Image (tube, rainbow, N blue to C red):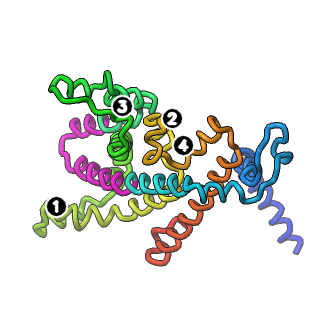
Amino acid sequence: MKTNNRRRRLADRHYLVYYLMLLPTIVFFVVFNYIPMTGIYYAFTKFSFTGGLFGSQFVGLDNFKYLFKSGILFRITRNTILYNIAFILIGNFAQIVLAVLISRVMGKLFKRITQSMLLLPYFVSFVILRVLVYNLFNYEIGLVNSTFASMGIAPYDFYNKTALWPFIIIFFYLWKSVGYGSVIYLASITGIDPELYESASIDGAGVFKQILYITLPLLKATFITLFLFSLGSILKGQFELFYQLVGSNGNLFTVTDIIDTFVFRSLTTDFDIGRSSAAGVYQSVFGFILIMTVNTIIKRKNPEYALF
């Protein structure tokens, strides 16, 4: 018995170094993730700066009722989910196609140049992107309307028309992200055993059949993993993209306002901390339920592809 206790004490001392190495990470998450969770209480109050966090008037679920009854919550949830579905599906499809095409390029120099050019948009800041879009679609000095004027066509007021903005936002999101995302799929393709392609070629399979029956099935695990990660933040949206491209243009809010931009605007313009917190709580809870549900479904169908 004494020998066993001594061994346990030695083992505890041995692992003490690893516990100390974990300490900074634990402190980080406690300070920046768990302590701020006390701010959830804001969602149930009518916040006042004089009362502070616990001195403000407690209103229960009134903030949530307002968001539901006013239709704001339905609108921003609809926009957030639809945009993210488009980002996930179209984005992953484009990334896979791009990765497959690059993997089939034989020239190493051409492949490197192509990858570098495709990665460049990812490093363009959203502020620069805003300037680019403004100079394209501005009513008076925009490139598009200047081209229309030179052709004798009446200018189009892009910033007062909602029909085109979903396509504009999706296009520029893909322009920035597809090149970077294709690198992940390209890494997965590189890890595929070349002997599989050699065997398929000997059996008479052409390039398209090799892609269809070897490359795409082996990319399934990568796609599902990235899909689950993307789904976890499906209600988070792309705040920088929407805020920089649309800004405070209320004419476009019906089709461009997402949860993140609504929360930010409620804090900075309306100073309604209670309602913005209620929207944030709704966003977190809904996203948690969604990712748990989808992961459970995938775990039942293909356990090896589930996150946990």
Magenta-drawn stretch contains 56: no
Q: Position of residue 22 (x, y in %)?
A: 71, 50
Q: Position of residue 161 (x, y in %)?
A: 36, 40
Give the numbered dot on residue 248. Answer: 2
Q: Main secondary structure of the magenta part?
A: helix
First in sequence, mark 4 or 1: give its number: 1
- Find the distance from the CA under tag 4 to the CA under tag 1: 43 Å
Q: Which residue is mark 4?
A: 261
* Quarter of the image with the N terminus in it: bottom right
First in sequence, mark 1 or 2: give its number: 1
First in sequence, mark 3 or 2: give its number: 3
Which amino acid type is shown beneath numbered disc 4? Thr
First in sequence, mark 4 or 2: give its number: 2
| Residue closest to the eye, 67 or 98 | 67
In front: mark 4 or mark 2?
Answer: 2
In front: mark 3 or mark 2?
Answer: 2
Which amino acid type is shown beneath numbered disc 2? Ser
Question: Are discs 3 and 4 less than 8 Å apart at CB?
Answer: no
Residue at (43, 59) in percent of width and height = 227
| Residue closest to the eye, 36 or 114 | 36
Q: Which residue is mark 3?
A: 133
- Find the distance from the CA under tag 3 to the CA under tag 2: 15 Å
